[in-house]
Image: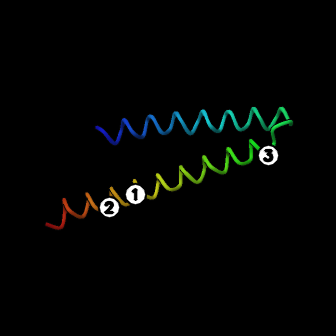
Amino acid sequence: MLITLIMAILTLVVTSFVVFGIVFWHKGEHQHLARSFLVITLSAFLIFFVILIAFFITSFSQHYFK
């Protein structure tokens, strides 16, 4: 339940960050800002994804290999 809530919030945050980045990119005056925005967002999402996968693997192994 908590994981689903965290996933929903993070998906919303990542989507809004990407939309902001694309909007800034198309305006043209803030391209370096948009690029750093997208890089930060993607790296944060990757880190979160790795943590989530590790959490699922540990909970799965604890559940099935007692």
Quadrant location of the C terminus? bottom left
Residue under pointer 2 = 57
Dot 3 crowding, Cα within 10 Å, few <14, some 14–19, many 20+: few
Query: What SS does tag 2 mark?
Result: helix
Q: Amino acid at mark 1?
A: Ile
SS state under label 1: helix
For residue 33, side relative to residue 27 (left or right): left
Task: Give residue 57's position: percent from left, percent from top.
Answer: 32, 61
Q: Earlier in the sequence, mark 2 or mark 3?
A: 3
In screen coordinates, is 35 left or right of 63?
right
- State the residue at coordinates (68%, 44%): 37
Side (left or right) of 30 relative to 52: right
Which amino acid does the dot numbered 2 rest on? Ile
* Mark 2 vs 3: CB contact within 8 A: no
In 3D space, how far apart are the residues under numbered discs 1 and 3 (Cα atoms)?
31 Å
Q: Is residue 49 left or right of residue 54?
A: right
Q: Residue at x 19, y 59 (%)?
A: 63
For discs 1 and 3, the disc positioned in front in the rendered view: 3
**Quadrant of the image occupied by residue 24:** top right
Residue picked out by circle 1 = 53
Q: Does the CB distance between marks 1 and 2 fall below 8 Å?
A: yes
Q: Answer whether labels 1 and 3 touch (C-beta < 8 Å).
A: no
Task: Residue at 24%, 64% (x, y): give it.
Answer: 61
Q: Nearer the viewer, mark 2 or mark 3?
A: 3
State the SS at label 3. Answer: helix
| Spatial CA span between label 1 and label 2 | 6 Å
Tell me the CA gap for discs 2 and 3.
37 Å
State the quadrant of the N terminus: top left
- The residue sitting at the bottom extreme is 65
Residue occupied by mark 3: 32
Is 34 above or below relative to 59? above
Residue occupying image coordinates x 71% and y 38%: 21
